Amino acid sequence: MAGSLTHECPQCRRSGSSGNLMRVHRRFIDRVISLLRPLRRYRCRSMDCDWEGNLPASRIPKRGGIPR
């Protein structure tokens, strides 16, 4: 399932099966930087946390393999 890997919020350190971070649309500058270093933009779902930022993109598994 795509997106099943969960990331921990770098600010509040929350994670879990509910997926505390959700992907959001990247800004233009994020797309430019992503040409050199693949990034994805996330926002924390926690009501107490207002973090939004970029995290490295996970490697896409090849032919059903597991991400490294």
Image (cartoon, grey):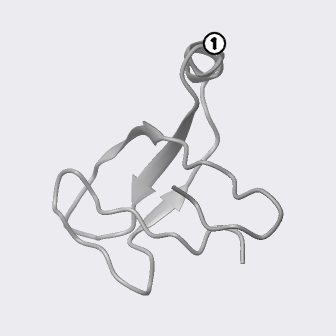
Could you say which is closer to the camera, residue 50 or residue 4?
A: 4
Q: Residue 44, position in %: x, y?
A: 36, 60
Q: Residue 66, position in %: x, y?
A: 62, 67
* Residue 39 sits above or below residue 63 on the image: above
* Residue 53 sits above or below residue 62 on the image: above
Question: Hey, which quadrant is residue 35 in on the image?
Answer: top right
* Amino acid found under the numbered disc labelled 1: Val
The residue shown at (77%, 56%) is 62
Q: Is residue 65 left or right of residue 50?
A: right
The residue shown at (22%, 51%) is 10
Q: Is residue 68 left or right of residue 60?
A: left
Q: Residue 27, position in %: x, y?
A: 60, 26
Packing grade of label 1 (10 A; few <14, some 14-19, many >=20) is few
Could you say which is closer to the camera, residue 62 or residue 47?
A: 62
Could you say which is closer to the camera, residue 64 or residue 27?
A: 64
* Residue 42 sits above or below residue 54 on the image: below
Q: Mark 1: which secondary structure?
A: helix
Q: Residue furthest right?
A: 63
Question: Hey, which quadrant is residue 17 in on the image?
Answer: bottom left
Q: Residue 36, position in %: x, y?
A: 58, 14
Q: Which residue is mark 1?
A: 32
